[in-house]
Every structure is written in structure tokens, then in C-alpha cells.
């Protein structure tokens, strides 16, 4: 087992070769650069390297907890998880966990091709995608067919913003650190406003995003996109992109301009710019949201659960995670309860602010 920073360039290159040979979309969360960035801010990060003779044939990035419980690298923020293996390789899961000195391997965004861990999934979720493989014009024609009122209204709001606020200007790959700080402030305020845990209140996540913002490799580039009106930022998004996938991660907008739907305009411009760059897919991640329903062209399955091996550690994992996961699943599966829970969270957030 190695720390991510201990991987040699030859091992990283082999990782990339194995990933390129996979039939899965080239999601940047599955690249060695993401694992290395997590390793810089999470000292418990590890990489298991599988060999046949002297040749690496597989990599499993993970984090090891103090009681020997394992979890996918960056669990809680990573939107695509699993092992990177030579096609056809299927190691014994229990033996792999034992070699990693972990009793379990928890995941919440396991990609569908992960045959090693999918049998241990407790739930299947949908991750929503935008297909721009055939160009942005084709994507717009799909939107016109499936949701003509949405597209017409959003474009009208963009024009109205131009008249009333200032000419919209979109930057796909903004390098200004101040714009990234603004996005984080908006996102933190959104988390607090909706009663959800503020991810950017956790130092390791803030440091991770800052580090990835400076990462620029062909298959993992931190990308900050900003929509301006009269040179004032009104919406922004930070994510990771490969040559073929833009992984949408942290979108937010200035509530002062909410009537213009700047977040929706931003996503349309991101799709347009991504298509122009040759990117075929925007992955908006799991979790239902109205804007995703309006923008998506399809969905892909991802999985939540944990692979365990018998012992005390597996029992500890079950006690620490399974009751809460089942409760969340019960609420998610009942729209009335989910709506009530969201209203309760917003009400609690208002009480904390008052």
C-alpha cells in the first residue's frame, strides 16, 4: 500500500492506460491526479497497487479510518468511485480488503462497471447527464423537443438580464482566484440557507478544491466557469474535466439575480463551451433537482453501499452507517416526506440565522 504521493510516474502512466482501456466514461474523479490531490489534504489516503509479476494491473484508491474501516477516496465529495483494473481482472474482494488492512470499503457513487464492488451495493441511484457528443446545436434541438417552454424561457431571461443588468459574458475556464472565492462564498451561503451541511466549512474540502483548481492535465483539469453581467459575476461553477467528460461539482449563483435564472443560463453556456472543446458528456451527479430534470438528456446508474469482510470491523461499519442510510433511503423514496424534510431543513436554517 502506498500514499498517493509515493506513486511513481510509471505507475501513474499505467493507471491512465488502464483507465483508457476501460469502457467506462473517462470521469476525472477516477484519474490519479484526483487521488493525489486528496492525498495532499487527507493523510489517511492510500492506493493499493495490484501486480502480475512486475507489471501493475490494478489500482484501488481508498481512505483508511482509525478503526480500520475503508472508504472510497474523497467519499462525500467524489462523484465517481471504484478500482482501476486491467480489463477482465477480477481479484477476490475479501483478499483485497485484507491486503489493504481494512474491514470494509464504503462507496456512495460507485460507477456501474465496477463488477468487483457492485454486488455489495445496497442502493442504485441515477446520475444525470447532458449529451453534447453531436454538438451544442443538437443538444438545443433535444431541449426544444422535450422541454420547449424551459429553453425558450431561459433564453428570454438571459436576454432580459442583458438589457436590465448588463451584457452577459461567459468564461469557460476562469483563472481569477477571486472568482473561485466568490463561488465558495455563494455555495456556503446556499448550504446554510437550505439547512444542509456546509462543505466549505470543512478545511480539507476547501484545500482540495484550491489544489484541484491548479491541476491541469489532459484527463483531470480543474475548471472554473463564470457567467458575468456587466463584468459582475452572477453565477459560477467549479468542476473537473477530462478530454471527454465535464464532471459538474459545485454550481452556485448570486441570489440577487435569481429572477434571471443565472444558474440555468450558466449550464447552457457550459454545455456549449464543452461541446466546442470536444467534450461529449456533462455529468451533473446524483441527486434529484429541478434544474437537472430540465437540462438532462439521460442518466447513468451509480451505486451506494459497502463491501465488507467478516469481523468486528464490518459490524462497526453497519452500526455507523447503515441505519442512517436506510432512513435517508426511506425519505427519498417518498416525495411527500422528502418535500417535508427539505422544508424542515430550510426552517431550521432560518431559525439559526435569526
Image (spheres, rainbow, N blue to C red):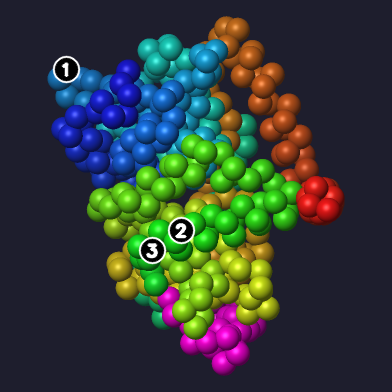
Crowding around mark 2 (Cα neighbors within 10 Å: few <14, some 14 to 19, many 20+) is: many
Crowding around mark 1 (Cα neighbors within 10 Å: few <14, some 14 to 19, many 20+) is: few
The span shown in magenta is 142-170
Whichever of labels 1 and 2 marks the residue nearer the N terminus, that label is: 1
Helix or strand or loop: what does disc 1 sit on?
Answer: loop
> Percent position (x, y) of residue 354?
83, 53
Q: Is residue 231 visible?
A: yes
Identify the residue position indicated by label 2 in the image.
180
Image side of residue 112 versus residue 273, left or right: right
Q: Nearer the viewer, residue 112 or 29?
A: 29
Give the spatial CA distance, label 3 vs label 2.
Answer: 7 Å
User: Magenta span has 167?
Assistant: yes
> Percent position (x, y) of residue 183?
52, 60
Helix or strand or loop: what does disc 2 sit on?
Answer: helix
Crowding around mark 3 (Cα neighbors within 10 Å: few <14, some 14 to 19, many 20+) is: few
Q: Nearer the viewer, residue 224 or 333?
A: 224
Identify the residue position indicated by label 3 in the image.
176
Give the prevailing secondary structure in the magenta stretch: helix
Q: Which mark is residue 298?
A: none
Q: Is residue 64 above or below residue 33?
A: above
Q: Residue at x 47, y 15 (%)?
A: 102
Q: Quadrant of residue 5?
A: top left
User: Residue reaching furthest bottom?
Assistant: 163
Contact check, label 3 and label 2, Cβ < 8 Å: yes
User: Residue reaching furthest top?
Assistant: 311
Amino acid at each position: 500500500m502506498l500514499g498517493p504521493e509515493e506513486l511513481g510516474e510509471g505507475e501513474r502512466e499505467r493507471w491512465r492506460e488502464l483507465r483508457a482501456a476501460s469502457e467506462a466514461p473517462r470521469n476525472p474523479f477516477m484519474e490519479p491526479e484526483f487521488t493525489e490531490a486528496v492525498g495532499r489534504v487527507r493523510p489517511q489516503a492510500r492506493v493499493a497497487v495490484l501486480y502480475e509479476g512486475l507489471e501493475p494491473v490494478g489500482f484501488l484508491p481508498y481512505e483508511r479510518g482509525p478503526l480500520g474501516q475503508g472508504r472510497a477516496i474523497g467519499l462525500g465529495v467524489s462523484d465517481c468511485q471504484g478500482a482501476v483494473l486491467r480489463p477482465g481482472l477480477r481479484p477476490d474482494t475479501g483478499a483485497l480488503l485484507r491486503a489493504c488492512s481494512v474491514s470494509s470499503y464504503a462507496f456512495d457513487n460507485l460507477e456501474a462497471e465496477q463488477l468487483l464492488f457492485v454486488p455489495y451495493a445496497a442502493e442504485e441511484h441515477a446520475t444525470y447527464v447532458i449529451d453534447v457528443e453531436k454538438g451544442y446545436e443538437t443538444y438545443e434541438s433535444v431541449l426544444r423537443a422535450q422541454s420547449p417552454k424551459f429553453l425558450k424561457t431561459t433564453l428570454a431571461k438571459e436576454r432580459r438580464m442583458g438589457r436590465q443588468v448588463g451584457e452577459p459574458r461567459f468564461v469557460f475556464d476562469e483563472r481569477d482566484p477571486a472568482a473561485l472565492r466568490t463561488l465558495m462564498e455563494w455555495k456556503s451561503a446556499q448550504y446554510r440557507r437550505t439547512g444542509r451541511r456546509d462543505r466549505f466549512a470543512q478545511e480539507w474540502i476547501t484545500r482540495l478544491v484550491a489544489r484541484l483548481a491548479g491541476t491541469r492535465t489532459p484527463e483531470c483539469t480543474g475548471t472554473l466557469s463564470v457567467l458575468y453581467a456587466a463584468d459582475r459575476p452572477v453565477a459560477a461553477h467549479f468542476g473537473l474535466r477530462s478530454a471527454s467528460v465535464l464532471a459538474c461539482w459545485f454550481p452556485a449563483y448570486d441570489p440577487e439575480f435569481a429572477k434571471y435564472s443565472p444558474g440555468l443560463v450558466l449550464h447552457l453556456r457550459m454545455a456549449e463551451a464543452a461541446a466546442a472543446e470536444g467534450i461529449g458528456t456533462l455529468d451533473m451527479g446524483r441527486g434529484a433537482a429541478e434544474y437537472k430534470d430540465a437540462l438532462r438528456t439521460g442518466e447513468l446508474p451509480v451505486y451506494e453501499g459497502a463491501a465488507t469482510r467478516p469481523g468486528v470491523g464490518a459490524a462497526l461499519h453497519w452500526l455507523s452507517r447503515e441505519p442512517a442510510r436506510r432512513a435517508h433511503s426511506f425519505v427519498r423514496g417518498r416525495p411527500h416526506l422528502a418535500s417535508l424534510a427539505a422544508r424542515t431543513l430550510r426552517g431550521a436554517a432560518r431559525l439559526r440565522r435569526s
